[in-house]
Amino acid sequence: MENIYIETYGCQMNFADSEVIAAILEKSGYTVCGSAEEADFILINTCAIRDNAEQRVRHRVRELKAMQNRRHNLRVGVLGCMAERLQSRLMAEEENVSFVCGPDAYRRLPEMLAQVRSGQKAAEVELSTTETYADIEPVRLAGNGISAYISIMRGCQNYCAYCVVPYTRGRERSRDSETIVREARTLFEQGYREVTLLGQNVNSYNAEIDFPELMARVAQIDPLLRVRFATSHPKDLSDKLLEVMAEYPNICRCIHLPVQSGSNRMLKLMNRKYTKEWYLDRVEAIRRHMPDCSITTDVIAGFSTETLEDHEATLELFRTVKYDYAYMFKYSLREGTYAWKHLADDIPEEEKTRRLNEIIALQGEIALENNKHEVGKEYEVLVEGESHRSKEQLYGRNSQNKVIVFDRKDAAPGTYRRVRVDSCTAATLIGVLVQ
Ligand code: SAH
Ligand code: SF4
Ligand code: F3S
């Protein structure tokens, strides 16, 4: 049968989706291969969150033309959020794309590929209010056999003013808890030691049980199974979740709590539904329940009408919270969003860049400062693999999700080892095995 190759861009949820896509197509007799060169079909699973994410995909699609000129039977399809956003417009604009498939239509891929093979083009972009792919056991692609993603819900209906996700992923829906727990247990039995439960706003998970209860059930599978989750919306981060986290040592001490801005005026305009004060109260609650919990965030520089005062409020918030890690972005206007309809994209590009760079520089100092405090501490590390620098070194992460590099000695990937931190950079901790 034919070979498919899946290339994935974007967030963890897209990576999880690619594993569902692989499962659906393998079941229909396709083989997932390891490189574009061997493929009969190349499926590009795309992201639409910022313009540069889309430009990268367009560049890749055009690059594949050369390969298609050499191999006439090679077909290229675009999947995921960009496919949903642009629909058949994308096939008109990029002539070498034969099919587009949105995030809720992956079950139709076998039919679509058959259609494409017979020389037609195909587009499936219908969104669903119920699809969760709950019954599909994902094919783990290019994983390390230690750590895996589990999608627990799909879609988002928070409608943050800047964000395209509600339009590309549709209404929020939760996957039933039994299939989630079963998937996690199977992974553990296969030797996996870490699962990350995924959703755009996991705190609003709402099936037969709520998110704290779901976390507890997954954590109960085995104390040796680490449980992580992403992403938490600050408006819905409950004390109940923090209590459950504190109760189970194998629920990791790390919360990703995207703030987006430190200015109440911006937060209101962004439709985030919380204030800076509410956010800081949640940070305090996290630290009260778990003093050793790391906190990470997302932030947007240069949203509509952002003043220097608003920007300064973001810097101030960063100084207060002292994040362990931050994903930092320049505002990118997305077609169809509330901001696109109603708010001016009025901060000049150079000014957005300047503000972003200021946040990046500050966060660099904070991360280094935080890491310096780690020197001398001992952590249980889940060993993941060889360090990129040297075969003599391994790396793993602690519960706080910080990467620690150490001399290999007798340690092996997939096991837990105690490591003492000896030194650090802003990005990495360097340690030694404690016998
Ligand atoms: N559901 C998650 C975020 C998913 S998107 C949440 O609400 O926290 C990941 C991040 O991309 C967002 O947190 C935001 O910081 C960023 N982002 C989203 N839309 C953006 C845009 N139009 N321009 C720049 N950054 C954006
Ligand atoms: Fe986008 Fe807001 Fe939904 Fe996150 S919560 S995916 S930022 S709309
Ligand atoms: Fe991108 Fe879609 Fe994820 S827009 S960030 S791939 S939900």
Image (spheres, rainbow, N blue to C red):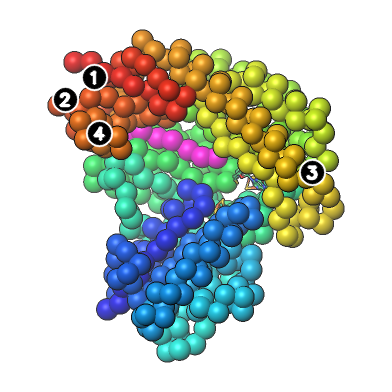
Nearest-to-viewer mark from 4 and 2: 4
Compared with residue 169, is residue 420 higher up or lower down, i.e. above or below?
Answer: above
**Tag 2: residue type?**
Lys
**Tag 1: residue type?**
Leu
In the rendered structure, which disc, 4 or 1, sits on the residue that comes first in sequence? 4
User: Seen in the image, is 228 located left or right of residue 395?
Assistant: right
Q: Residue at x 29, y 41 (%)?
A: 146
Percent x, y of residue 418: 27, 19
Q: Residue at x 83, y 50 (%)?
A: 344
Percent x, y of residue 248: 40, 25
Residue 288 forms part of the magenta stretch: no
Percent x, y of residue 116: 45, 83
Nearest-to-viewer mark from 2 and 3: 3
Q: In 3D space, how far apart are the residues under numbered discs 4 and 1 (Cα atoms)?
A: 16 Å
- The residue where tag 1 is placed is 433
Q: In 3D space, how far apart are the residues under numbered discs 2 and 3 (Cα atoms)?
A: 53 Å
Which element is circle 2 on? Answer: loop
Query: Badge 1, how many Cα within 10 Å: few under 14, some, many 20+?
Result: many
Residue 202 shows in the view: yes
- The residue where tag 2 is placed is 409
